[in-house]
Structure formats: C-alpha cells, structure tokens
Image (cartoon, helix red, strand yellow):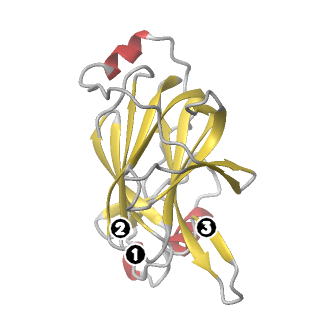
Amino acid sequence: MGKRQSLSIKRHWAKPYDRRPESGHRSGIRGAYFGLRRQKRRKSRMPPIPPMNDFDYSTSGLSIQEAMVKDIKKYPSKIKRPRSIRWGSHRIQSADLLDVPNEGRIRLAFLSWTNTTVKQAVDISLKGNFWLADGTGVSALRTSLDPHLENFVEYPYTANDSVIQIWNVYEMTYPAGQVIEERMTRNAGFWIEIVSPNERIYHSSHGLCNPPDFESLVFKISIGPRKLRLLS
C-alpha cells in the first residue's frame, strides 16, 4: 500500500508533503489518555455551548449551508447561536471544535466511503502546530481520501488554546473547467458519533450530494498522549 500524502495548508493554498507518519509500534491507549489530566492543561477558549434549534431543515428544500445561513440570521448573538441544525434524526455541523489537551497526538482514520467519483478530504487546524516526521510544525493539514494509500495519518500536536478544528472538503469542477477544493458549501456537513471522550466518528456528506449522503465519507478522530501510538 502506498504512502499517505498530507498537505500543509497556508492561506488556502495547499503544498504537498509526501511522507507517511513516523514508523514504530502503535500502542493502545486504553486508560493511558486519562493520564494527560495530570499534565498542565491550559484553559480552553471555546465559547459556552449554545442552545439547539429543533426545526427540521431536511424537509425545507434548502441545502445544508443555505439552512445554516438562514438559521444564523435568527441568532445575531454568537453566544446564543446554535452550532448545528437538525436534519432528520441528526444534528448537522459544517465544522467541529474539538476540546483537547494542549499537547497530545491526533489520529485521523478513514473508515468507509460510498464512492470515489468526487475527490474528498478532511482538514484539521489549530492555533499551534502539528509536528511532522521531519520536525516541521504546521498549523493546518489536509488529508485526501485515496483507497490506494494507507487509511490513516497520525501526528503529535501542540494546541495553544486547547482546540482543534475539523471539517470535510470536496473537489468542485465549475463549467469553465476551474477546479476548486471547497468546504462548508452546498450539502457539505456531518453528524458526529461520540465513541468515547477521546474518539469521535464523523459521518460526512460532500457538497455535491443531493440529497445529503452522510455516509459518503466516514472518518474517525482519536486524541491521545503525545508519546504513544494510537490504535485505529
């Protein structure tokens, strides 16, 4: 199986970083992650969780992003504004703010996908650094789905405000032939399955799905101690 290609994102442009995560033993994290609580942890700057809006937008005829824009207009105050909208039986978000220890290790694993017709990817971003194998620090990484490559990437990180941002990306080709990797447009979004305090599974729809297909790309984010490899 080929090496996974990661991209460092700067000013919305991606530069290739053709390297797989460091090799080595992948230790389990059962019980180990909670030892991080003994470390000094910076206070998260995440705002308080706002209330949820229970209006079901799945029958509105709007796209996910149109529904989110409409919902935002109802809440001028960012503090009172819901972070998700109801779509059928799920709460849908266009991005996730993950509260994490200020130092640790993140693993992104692709679990399943419905097709590869539309190129898809996942972005992770923070105020700080993800540490690459050569010691380089970058604040944003884009990992593209490719069935011919390894299905995961894993990096140590330092998050200055103890928050990691996550969203899904898809490739859009416009009539003039322009190809753009888009995020948070059309029917792009996901619902989150919380597996444990340090693991979440994201059931995502790319923007061209109509209606949304939240199994178009399913991926898992795991957070653990910086010095330990994480299980898939």
Horizontal and vertical percent for residue 72?
59, 63
Closer to us: 203 or 175: 175
Q: Is residue 120 above or below residue 47?
A: below
Horizontal and vertical percent for residue 6?
55, 48
Contact between labelled residues 1 and 2, with CB atoms less than 8 Å apart = yes
Quarter assignment of residue 130: top right
Closer to us: 86 or 176: 176
Callout 2 amino acid? Phe
Residue name at image x 34 percent, y 44 percent: 200
Q: Residue at label 3?
A: 182
Quarter assignment of residue 33: top left
Q: Secondary structure at mark 1?
A: loop
Residue extending furthest bottom?
A: 175
Cα distance between the residues tagged 1 and 3: 16 Å
Quarter assignment of residue 27: top left
Contact between labelled residues 2 and 3, with CB atoms less than 8 Å apart = no
The answer to whether residue 217 of the structure is visible from this angle is yes
Q: Residue at label 1?
A: 212
Residue name at image x 38 percent, y 81 percent: 59
Callout 1 amino acid? Pro
Q: Is residue 163 above or below residue 178?
A: above
Q: Residue at label 2?
A: 214
